[in-house]
Image (cartoon, rainbow, N blue to C red):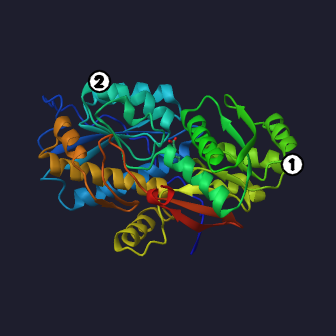
Amino acid sequence: MRYALTLLIALTALFSASLTGCKDKGNDAGGGGADEIRVGVFLSLSGANADFGKTTKNGIDLAVEEINEAGGINGKKLVIIAKDTRSKPEEAQTVAKQLASQDKVAVAIGSVESGQSIKAAPVFQEAGIPMVSPSSTNPDVTKQGDRIFRVCYLDDFQGQACAAFAYKDLGFRKAALIYAQDDDYSKGLAQYFREAFKGMGGSIVEEAPFQGDVSEFKDQVSKIAAAGPDVIFAPVYYAKIGLIARDFRKQGVTVPLVGGDGWESPQLIQLAGETLEGSYFGYHYDPDDQDAKVQGYLKAYSAKFGSDPNSLSALGYDAVYAVKLAIELGGGSSADQITEGLRKIKDFKGVTGTFSIDENRNAKKSITMLKIGGSNLSKVKVIKPEDLK
Ligand code: PHE
């Protein structure tokens, strides 16, 4: 039941050039010539969150390779045009404009970070191009327009699940919060945790938000230490959690930290050392699932990349197969047909679970809580949406 967090070595140059030749497509919303379907991908392939983009891109590439090797979709091959958002929301907007107007993609997949997806979504919406986020969980993402979809759970659920886990399963009553005030994901998830934890009868004994790209958390830690919490909720990304945990341990605070999906990285253990020992975070799928689809994916991924897949790669993989199904359900590969098809997705069986696209273009899925121990992650609990009702 334990699976090693192996270090992912950046495997290939992921900065795919967006030039695929000068064929005149002629069809603005068609996203490709007669024999291809252009799929725009925008992810953090460099910068602070580069692991998010690289692992997601691996999952996307694997799915595209499988689909194209099997003959494509209705005889058309998927062509990926990937852009690097450099871990910046503004850059996500810039590359979205390029994908929409220069590359004329039929559909876009991205981003991981909610802040980026929220900035890019209006560009695609405006251009009439459907966008599918594999892993952006902030509720506002799909509120940007009726062509904006996602294939992951949402932060109102994730915040509630983390609060229920801390309160009911771990038995904690006094929580403190540390989060990035200027980040949609971090701020939003802190809010959902706060509401849910208080709603259950717990108290939030201290809050220590931070702002900007800081790497020192001394002040926030002193403030929280003085309040004596028995658990700390830290909805931040992987590059920050190691630094935050280090500062807590330096000041002698040893209570467990709990985080959301954002802690995920093949480098988590390396970055956090032993400081995250005994802490917990949320994950998007259950790699122990014996389902043939999950096990087949794990095998294919390891064979192609020589490393263990993670939930980001699984979500990228599922996003591509959701687009394939949408093309089939929508009756073609124009932007309009893919949008129609995405709206029709029901009981889609992915690696990250079975889900339907609801009327708000969201998916309802389970969260898997993992515990960090030694250099391993182990599954503690799977929380389903219906468990929290
Ligand atoms: N859910 C995070 C966000 O919305 C992104 C993320 C997903 C990060 C999965 C890691 C793993 O910003």
In the rendered image, which residue does mark 1 sit on? 250
Tell me the quadrant of the picture where the N terminus can be found: bottom right
Dot placed on the residue nearer the N-terminal end, 1 or 2:
2
- The answer to whether the residue bearing label 1 lies less than 8 angstroms from the nearest atom of ligand 1 is no
Q: Which mark is residue 352?
A: none
Closer to us: 242 or 358: 358
x then y, percent, for residue 80? 31, 44
- Crowdedness of circle 1 by 10 Å Cα count: few (<14), some, many (20+)? few
In this rendering, the answer to whether 178 lies above or below 299 is above
x then y, percent, for residue 268? 64, 54
Q: Residue at x 24, y 28 (%)?
A: 128
In this rendering, the answer to whether 165 lies above or below 374 is above
Relative side of 102 to 151, left or right: left
Q: Which mark is residue 126?
A: 2
Which amino acid type corresponds to the residue marked 2 in the rendered image? Answer: Glu
| Count of all numbered marks drawn on residues in the image | 2
In this rendering, the answer to whether 285 lies above or below 288 is above
x then y, percent, for residue 378? 61, 68
